[in-house]
Image (cartoon, rainbow, N blue to C red):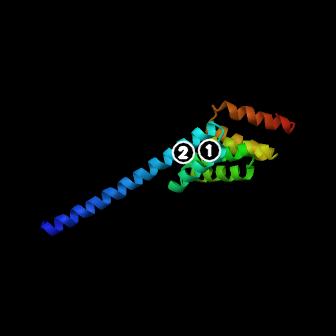
Amino acid sequence: MTVAKTSSFKILLFAVTLTLQGGAIAQTTAVDCYNRGNAKQAKGDLDGAIADYNRALELNPKYVKAYDNRGVAKQTKGDLDGAIADYNRALELNPKSVDAYCNRGSAKQAKGDLDGAIADYSRALELNPKYPDAYTVRAGCQANQGRS
């Protein structure tokens, strides 16, 4: 290999390395934003949490947990439609997310859509039959409908 080819190869290798590191940094930053959002949500700073989840999703648009937790923050603020939209997106990305089904069921229940809530809780239980909270809230919905 000549000096020119060696230099070109080194430059190409350096560029590939930077690209790969950039991808890893973006993922780490998304995780950092997600974790910061969780901390803010735990302290009751829902607007701050939503902003951090938004940033995490800008960096990683397929971050299922960020959609799910942003939905929880929106639901806590009373934005049930926004929460359901986030849970729907989480389920598009991961159709086996028990948390997203339970959270969406909770939002549907809060909107008065008991049939939809029961369907979501039932789907969560199909995916994880050992999830006791889903049994409890589904039974509450069924009791409100006059069935158990």
Q: Residue at x 62, y 53 (%)?
A: 89
Q: Which mark is residue 26?
A: none
Q: Residues within 10 Å of mark 1 (few under 14, many from 20)?
A: many
Q: How crowded is mark 2: few (under 14 residues within 10 Å), some or many (20 or more)?
A: many
User: How many circles with numbers are drawn on the protein?
Assistant: 2
Is residue 119 visible from the viewing direction of this image?
no
Q: How far apart are marks 2 and 1 (CA)?
A: 9 Å
The quadrant of the rendering that contains the C terminus is: top right
Q: Which amino acid does label 2 sit on?
A: Tyr
Residue 61 placement (x, y as % from top left): 54, 55
Label 2 sits on residue: 34
The quadrant of the rendering that contains the N terminus is: bottom left
Residue 114 placement (x, y as % from top left): 80, 44
Residue 141 placement (x, y as % from top left): 80, 38
Q: Which of marks 2 and 1 is nearer the N terminus?
A: 2
User: Quick check: 137 above or below 81?
Assistant: above
Is residue 99 visible from the viewing direction of this image?
yes
Viewer-side residue, 74 vs 130:
74
With 47 as the anchor, is 21 left or right in this view?
A: left
- Badge nearest the viewer, 2 or 1: 2
Please identify the quarter of the rendering in which residue 105 is found: top right
Q: Residue 69 carries which label?
A: 1
- Check if mark 2's residue and mark 1's residue have beta carbons within 8 Å: yes
Q: What residue type is labelled 1?
A: Asn
Q: Which residue is drawn at 73% across and 52% down?
A: 81
